[in-house]
Image (cartoon, grey):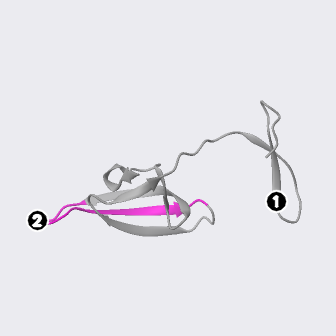
Amino acid sequence: MLDVNKLKVGVTFAEDGFPWKVMKYEFTKMGRGNANIKIKARNLVNGMISPKSYLSGSMVEEVNLVKKHMQYLYKDEIKAYFMDQVSFEQV
């Protein structure tokens, strides 16, 4: 789990079963009470950008992503196939 205070630009997290990437981060503390964290996040599955708001101290699920350069091979009716250019592994 990841504290919402650590959600900075570029951090990925999971919510509602989808992975999200933080595009904009804003921390607001007004008078008494909890701080409010407002972010704009991009859904990494469908590309939709959505504003989200959290109270300080809330937790979200952390997602670790690995970026690789892959070569597109082909697609069938359901899947697309790619090849790792270093290990020649196909996914």
Residue at the farthest left position: 32
Q: Are marks 1 and 2 in contact (CB under 8 Å)?
A: no
In the image, the segment drawn in magenta is 28-44
Residue type for callout 1:
Lys
Relative side of 86 to 19, left or right = right
Judge whether residue 55 can be spotted in this image: yes
Q: Residues within 10 Å of mark 2 (few under 14, many from 20)?
A: few
Residue 30 belongs to the span the image colors magenta: yes
Q: Amino acid at mark 2?
A: Gly
Q: Position of residue 2 (x, y in %)?
A: 39, 51
Residue at image location 53% in from the left, 45% down from the top: 64
Q: Nearer the viewer, residue 19 or 59?
A: 59
62 in relation to 43, above or below: above
Q: Residue at x 52, y 62 (%)?
A: 42
Residue 30 vs residue 81: left or right?
left
Mark on residue 48? none
As drawn, 52 above or below 22 = below
Question: Which residue was labeled with disc 2?
Answer: 31
Give the label, 1 or 2, closer to the camera: 1
Residue 32 is situated, as x and y percent measured from the top left of the image, at 10, 65
Label ID, residue 79: 1
> Helix or strand or loop: what does disc 2 sit on?
loop
Residue 1, image x and y in percent?
41, 51
- Seen in the picture, residue 82 relative to 58 is either above or below; the reply is above
Question: Separation of disc 1 and disc 2 at Cα?
Answer: 52 Å
Q: Residue at x 79, y 34 (%)?
A: 85
Q: Percent position (x, y) of residue 54?
A: 33, 65
Q: Badge 1 local density, few (<14 within 10 Å), some, or many (20+)?
A: few
